[in-house]
Image (cartoon, grey):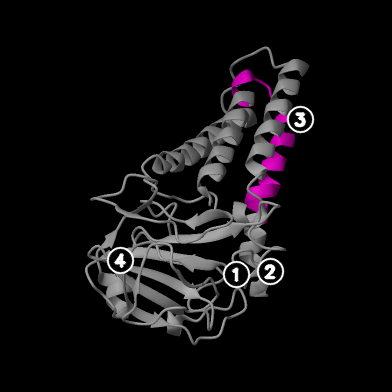
Amino acid sequence: MIYFPVFLTVFMHLVLPVAFIFWMYNAKAESKLFFFSIVLLYTSYLVFLWLLGAGWGWLGVFWPKIFAIAFGLALFLRIKKGLPASWTVKKWSRPFFSTGLNLVLSAIFLAYILTFLNARDFEGEALELEFPLAGGTFFVGHGGANKNVNQHYPVKAQRYALDIMELNSFGTRARGLLPGAPEKYQIFGNEIVAPCQGEVIAAKGHLTDQRATVTDPDNLLGNHIILYCQGHSILLAHLREGSLKVEVGDMVSRGQPLAEVGNTGNTSEPHLHIHAVLGRHVEKNDIAFIGQGVAMTFGGRFLIRNDKIEN
């Protein structure tokens, strides 16, 4: 089952962009309109992937820049080679329908791009926190104020949740494409620090770390800590077995070590899940589902998918 999403991610993020570049350069366009419909389709698709694509952390966050440079070079060479003399296409011809299809697909991608524009438009007042990880380059896999950038958004309590990974020196979050061993993920074992001053109101740390792609929906949160800070409950989930440095009732200060990132609970790979809920909550349904999710900022920054954090 894991092979299909891997194949789809590689196909959408790598194969299609390369194919579009070759298609544009080699297209025997019968009109300028047809040619520029190809250019618009590729441009809208690349911007769509750059902003909304969820696979760059797997494949390398540098790829969109490479594709943009390659596309610009190919476009320059193609125009230099010469364009068709006519602007129009013959009605009901194959290029006529191809041009129409390109424009329709471009409109679809542009519509998705427009949803990205409000991805930072959260409701209410944000809770200012300290970023809970240090010593690396971190990457938001899911996060933001709409469902196109944040898989958690439809769930009331998790509306502004973040799934945070770490990038290695190659710009990927793991050694290999979705490896099974959690130790191959850059973030696994990283120290988590308290994002605020407050009280530990829930803590669990005995669950065994799973292999990546093996989820545990019966223990949704996995090993976790819930802090009560400034009238909010802050959930830090999917922690490493035996790594907790605090217990229920402890008072913690900002930046105090709490635990390590692991791979426990309903997660497919090592990462840190964090979200804030208004009020004091320790019950799973309250903290995970029905509580009132609150936006979080870190250094005044509201994070969304594909944001990078140097810390």
- The stretch of residues the image draws in magenta is 10-34
Q: Which residue is mark 1?
A: 188
Q: Are marks 2 and 1 in contact (CB under 8 Å)?
A: yes
Q: Earlier in the sequence, mark 4 or mark 2?
A: 4
Q: Amino acid at mark 3?
A: Asn
Task: Give how far apart the Cα atoms at labels 2 and 1 are.
Answer: 8 Å
Q: Amino acid at mark 2?
A: Lys
Frontmost of labels 3 and 2 is 2
- Does 95 sit left or right of 25 as displayed? left
Q: Amino acid at mark 4?
A: Ala
Please provide percent x and percent y for residue 237.
44, 72
Please provide percent x and percent y for residue 95.
63, 29
Q: Are marks 3 and 2 in contact (CB under 8 Å)?
A: no
Frontmost of labels 4 and 2 is 2
| Residue 198 sits in quarter | bottom left
Secondary structure type for disc 2: helix
Q: Amino acid at mark 1?
A: Phe
Secondary structure type for disc 1: loop
Task: Give how far apart the Cα atoms at labels 3 and 4 are.
Answer: 50 Å
Q: Badge 2 local density, few (<14 within 10 Å), some, or many (20+)?
A: some
Q: Which residue is mark 4?
A: 157
Residue 144 within the magenta-colored segment of the rendering: no
Task: Give how far apart the Cα atoms at labels 4 and 2 are.
Answer: 31 Å
